[in-house]
Amino acid sequence: MTVDKQILSDIRPRFWERCALDEMTHREWEALCDGCGVCCLVKFLDEDDVHFTEYTDVACQLLDCQSGLCSNYEHRQNYVPDCIRLTPDMLPDMMWLPRHCAYKRLYLGQNLPKWHRLIGDEKTHQQGLARVGVARRCVSERNFNDEQIEERVIRWVKI
Ligand code: SF4
Ligand code: SF4
């Protein structure tokens, strides 16, 4: 996913406490993403129990591994057709998202993480991202084959 500072303008104050997920504007919906990049990692999903899902530190070909952001978010589906365009109705099947992800948390009736950019200052946001985000600790899938990816399972993503 991405962080577009434009999106942070023109949103209602604390909209996530005032309206349901399917009542948010496009900008508000996009503003919920903290830009951690975890959903852009290659993972092995367990359909029966998401807690057995295994994340790797191998990232989508479009992810900038330094910033942890999508390098071409607007046109991403031209290059990565199976990139998920998240909508509220998909969330019941998306419990493999990390536990800090705002979409998952709001769906589960939880608060945003305290360090989320919609709540705290930029420094706090960056500190939170440093703990959970993929920036500077992932590698691009361009450089690995399927067999090599299977060997790169990581444990620092918490579901
Ligand atoms: S895991 Fe959630 S918060 Fe992180 S980039 Fe994906 S959608 Fe955004
Ligand atoms: S195209 Fe890749 S890097 Fe961009 S948002 Fe989708 S999964 Fe993430």
Image: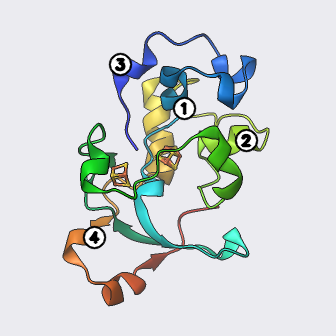
Tell me the colour scheme of the image. rainbow
Name the amino acid, label 3.
Answer: Gln
Between marks 2 and 1, how big is the CA–CA gap?
12 Å
Left or right relative to 25: residue 139: left
Structural crowding at the residue carrying mark 3, measured as other residues with C-alpha within 10 Å and reported as few (<14), some (14–19) or many (≥20): few
**Label 2 SS:** helix
- Residue located beneath label 3 in the image: 6
User: Can the viewer see residue 56?
Assistant: yes
Name the residue nearer the viewer: 17 or 132.
17
C-beta proximity under 8 Å, tags 4 and 2 = no
Residue at the spot 47% in from the left edge and 55% down from the top edge: 39
- Residue located beneath label 2 in the image: 107
- Residue located beneath label 1 in the image: 32
Name the amino acid, label 4.
Answer: Glu
- x, y percent for residue 52: 66, 77
Left or right relative to 128: residue 1: left
